Amino acid sequence: MRSTIFGLVLLLPAAALAEPIETQKIITAATGDWNGDGAADLAMIVETEPGSPMDLYFFLKDRDGDFLKPVGIVHDQIDGEWKDYDRPGPATSDTEPELTALPNGSIKLYIPAMEIGSERTNKTLTLAWRNGTFVVAGFAYEYWDYMDDNVAGDCDYNVLTGKGKSSKKLADGSTRQATVSVEGKVIPFAEWTPGTGFSACGE
């Protein structure tokens, strides 16, 4: 995967990036048709520095010029664990986000729980190209506490329509199911706050 990504980056015009990207910092990438024009586009997650959120780069294929055109960089939205690639020893981490191209042209962004404390929350966002920007079309999460069997829950809802479903484990071990029904919103990914999603899900 990383060698393929490296090749894609080399194909970008020099003016496409404000500054060079160290290929060791590219965590993951996905190609798909984000804007529905039949051409292969690109999204990739890039590390910044230790302790800081990662960046998500978006590119659309310019069919006339036959190159990948940058259409945005979103900062401070993706948590993950620094790989220590610039230090001696294995450059690995246990918490890395993932990108997946969906059949409808949207992007699935999976952000696994950071291994801090006993309660963990995995988050998934669905990103879609709308009116010249990437927006959050869907939000989902699942949480649990590995020290308490009765602490767990999940939610999955469509941000654009405000509709979805959630569940929460109760103290007696039973599970309460609920319907999510809030006002639909169009929120650019750059302006997204997880609190919006958790609030819609009743957390």
Image (cartoon, rainbow, N blue to C red):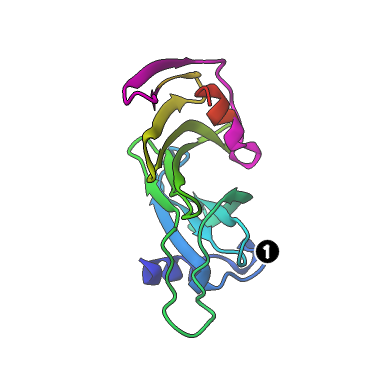
The residue singled out by tag 1 in the image is 18
Q: Is residue 4 above or below residue 122?
A: below
Q: Can residue 135 be found in the magenta stretch?
A: no
Q: Is residue 139 above or below residue 174?
A: below
Magenta span of residues: 167-195
Secondary structure state at the residue bearing disc 1: loop
Q: Amino acid at mark 1?
A: Ala
Mark 1 burial class by Cα count in 10 Å: few <14, some 14-19, many 20+: few
Q: Is residue 132 visible?
A: no
| Residue shown at the point (40%, 52%) measured from the top left | 31
User: Quick check: 105 left or right of 133?
Assistant: left
Residue 150: percent from the left, percent from the top?
37, 32
Instruction: Report whether 137 appears left or right of 146.
Output: right
**Image quarter in which the N terminus is found:** bottom left
Residue positioned most to the right: 18
Is there any visible trace of residue 134 in the rendered image? yes
Residue 103, placed above or below residue 81: above
- Indicate whether 185 appears above or below 28: above
89 or 47, which lies in front?
89
Q: Position of residue 162 (x, y in %)?
A: 50, 19
Query: x, y (%) of residue 167?
Result: 38, 24
